[in-house]
Amino acid sequence: MANDKLHTLRALRAGCAAALASLCALATIPALANVGPPMIGGDLVAEPTGLESIDVTGEMLEIDLRPLEQAQPARISATYQLDNRGQGREVELMFVTLSPRVSSFEVTLNGEYIEPNTRQIDATSLPATWQPPAQTPGLNEAAIGYFPTGKVNSEVAVALFKPDIPAGPSTLTVRYEAEAVRYMGGGLPTDQWQLAYSLAPARSWASFGQLNVSVLVPPGWQIATEPPLTRQGDALSGTFNGVPADAIALTARAPEPALYRIAALVLPVLLVVILAGGLVAILRLGWLRGRGGKGVVLAALGMALLWAALVLVIGLAGVLVPPSLLPPLQANDYGYERAFTLIGVVVLAGLAAIVGFASAVLAGLLARGRAQAQP
């Protein structure tokens, strides 16, 4: 009898721990249930207007997506080789971001810095060539709809530069940051990042020669591009004569590590094993206690609480551990699925306690009845 009491006290202690874990799980739900549109952020990234009377013999465009690893804006750098066939003239270069702000624009002409001027304009007054593409290529599905935040804003920021372009050749360099769209749909473990660089305004330039494109991604990241670019390591490149498309559209994401895939597979399987094995063990214990004629209820309570606690711990681990193994700042937390799964785990543990106790008692009573019926 003393052993039964000790066993029951230990089981009750495990049940208290299970209850505490349940409260911790429920406390995480509000943070996981903050669901809005499946995409956030995004600036318009485009060629400037203002070169309608200037020949552009070549452009070196670099799109650096490596800051996305830290959820920071991408870095854009464009170097234009200009050829002014007439006299020196002042031009007005205009860059639009499709957001309420202008972010870190830096323009130099032949190495000399040009002071910017910024203002707000009505988004509806922008020419059609400024609008972003409707989609970017998908990584595991069809193309993804592309909706930069500023697309719905009534006012957007523009950066204006008025350089004096000398006669003959010169070099214009533009550097700035651009916020990518963070797309949380698609059912992938990590968020997808979208960025589109509009080339359409270049069609209005006097002429456009060769375009050399370079895209840098964080180590090992997946990326899809349109038009296609050649990948070598973590750099992609392409060379085009003239304007190859209205926009260069990019979609990239951090891949899930092998440890994540292992945990996401093993923990659910382990939960199933514990559910099945625990029930068998409880029935067996109840039967043995019933044949012995003592301690059935206490043993049933202890085993049921221990089984429920184990179900709760492994279930919570299956929900919370795999996301913790994903790259920092990249985990896809969109939707209510994880919150509902946590609730489901808590309910499952409660049911395990009830079913386990009832099953053990029933098995014990059946065993005792059979033992008493034997001569």
Image (cartoon, rainbow, N blue to C red):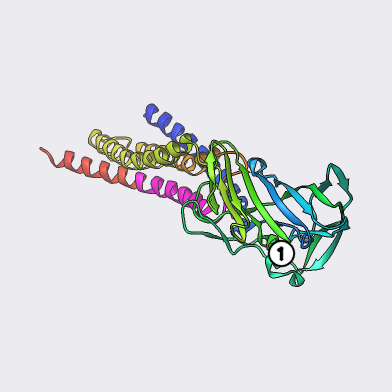
Quarter where residue 136 is shown = bottom right
Local crowd at mark 1 within 10 Å, few (<14), some, or many (≥20)?
some
Residue 215 vertical placement versus 154 (above, below): above
Quarter assignment of residue 311: top left
The dominant secondary structure in magenta is helix
Q: Mark 1 is on which residue type?
A: Ser
Q: Quadrant of the C terminus?
A: top left
Q: Residue furthest left?
A: 375
- Which one is nearer the viewer's eye here, 285 or 140? 140
Q: Percent x, y for residue 343? A: 50, 52
Q: Is residue 191 visible?
A: no
Quadrant of the snapshot with the N terminus: top left
Q: Residue at x 79, y 51 (%)?
A: 103
- Asked if residue 102 is positioned above or below residue 121 in the image, the reply reads above
Let me know if residue 349 is in the magenta part: yes
Picture coordinates of residue 224 (x, y %)? 53, 50
Lateral position of residue 311 relative to residue 113, left or right: left
Q: Circle 1 sits on which residue?
A: 204
Q: Does the image show residue 330?
A: yes
Image coords of residue 17 (percent x, y): 52, 37
Q: Nearer the viewer, residue 53 or 333?
A: 53
Name which residue lies at 81% across and 67% down: 121
The magenta segment is: 334-356
In reply to whether residue 29 is colored magenta, the answer given is no
Image vertical order of residue 64 relative to residue 51, above or below: above
Query: Which residue is farthest top?
Result: 3
Seen at 33% across and 47% down, the residue is: 358
Question: Which type of secondary structure does the marked residue at label 1 adopt?
Answer: helix
Task: Pick the residue in front: 341 or 102.
Answer: 102
